[in-house]
Amino acid sequence: MAAQPISVVHIITKMELGGAQRNTLYTVRHLDPQLFRVYLLTGPGGELLEEARACPGWRLIPDLLREVSPRRDLAAMLQIRRELRRIVADAPGAAPVIVHTHSSKAGILGRWAAWLAGVPIIIHSVHGFGFHGYQRPLVRMLYQVLERLSARITSRFIVVSEANLKTGEAAGIFSRHDACLIRSGIDIEAFARAPSDPQAVRRELGIRPGVPLVTMVACFKPQKAPLDFVESCAEVHRRYPEACFLLAGDGELRARIEARVAECGLEKHFFMPGWRRDVAELLHASQVAVLSSYWEGLPQVVPQACAAGVPVVATRVDGTPEVVRDGVNGFLVAPGAIDMLARKIIHLLERPEQARAMGRAGQNMIADFDINAMVRSQERLYCELAGRRE
């Protein structure tokens, strides 16, 4: 008799257009249905919510919000526990149940809800930690304590970068034995494939063919430092007055970004089209991809740019140097080093042959980021923890 499928419950806070959310949604859709019964628990909101709703195992957790609120956080944990108890009760026979959490908020609340619901196998994916060097010491310490406590009920950690693995070890959250490295995957072929109409993005935005285009794709929040990108663009503009700049995304800093763009006199050269699904087309329309983050897990847009053959100028934080080799497929600068960020962008605009060579080098360095390999690695981990052979 064939073994009953393993129930796997993914829990994530908000279905925004981020790498963790896209990869979680892809995993939920592509796990082998012969081996797994899949569920997805999310909070309300986010650009990917409608796609999440279309998943057969989707459940809404109304109080699962990103903002810290003791009352609503407790309510969310109890709501998750209730859903997990239903899933455990519905599991066929003695088939195991696995809870797999993502992001800091859902990671803490989801793991404790799973423990309270009696779920035997609890996995947490680290897409970057909730604590970092830019927080007040007491806040950082609180997050570390919460992570250490939650680690006690965690069966295994997944990290997307070696840097996160080292950070988790140094903070006393887990040992190397407790974690496995599974890269945050992308559809490499889709990003490598040239668009059928290479000028479509430029026509839409009103950017002339041949004009240099520098692009950053990111959420408008302090972590990504989009205002640093604006400042570096202002410096590039002084050297290349015809250059254009694209900042795709949205978030809490939009009004400040728009004000600073106006102050720098960049209104006719700076484009903010909001969240975009056509990231591959945006990158193929660009000469340089930029990421100005202060901290990261492993930013998905960096291997996406590499797959598209675009050189990257990024800050040397966390997992980014595991994708960008300085001087080979792009350049790395210190976080907050706006002048150096601008200088490296200018360097690539002044040397188009070198920029193209770096782009080609990047395409040869990202085999580890295949999204289907990511799903298969997770399947192997689930089977291992459930005591199954694939």
Image (tube, rainbow, N blue to C red):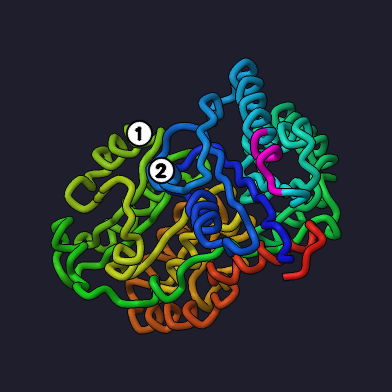
**Which quadrant, please, contains the N terminus?**
bottom right
Frontmost residue, 227 versus 49? 49
Q: Amino acid at mark 2?
A: Leu
Q: Main secondary structure of the magenta part?
A: helix
Q: Quadrant of residue 376?
A: bottom right
Which residue was labeled with disc 2?
Answer: 227
Q: Is 189 above or below relative to 388?
A: below
- Magenta run includes residue 90: yes
Q: Is 140 on the left-hand or right-hand side of 211?
A: right
Q: Residue at image x 75%, y 29%? A: 142
Above or below — where is 320 with respect to 137?
Answer: below
Give the x, y percent position of residue 180: 75, 61
Measured as percent of width and height from the top left, residue 65 is found at 53, 29
- Residue 94 is one of the magenta-drawn residues: no
Circle 1 packing at 10 Å, graded few (<14), some (14-19), many (20+), is few
Image position of 354 with respect to 4: above or below? below
Rendered location of residue 33, percent (x, y):
57, 61
Q: Is residue 367 visible?
A: yes
Q: What amino acid is found at the position of numbered circle 1 in the picture? A: Arg
* Residue with the mark numbered 1: 256
Q: Identify the residue at horizontal 68%, vertical 30% (top origin).
A: 81
What range is drawn magenta here? 86-92
Q: Quadrant of the C terminus?
A: bottom right
- For the point 65% across and 28% down, the residue is 82
Check whether the beta carbons of the residues at disc 1 and disc 2 lie within 8 A of each other.
yes
Q: Secondary structure at mark 1?
A: helix
Q: Position of residue 382 (x, y in %)?
A: 72, 59
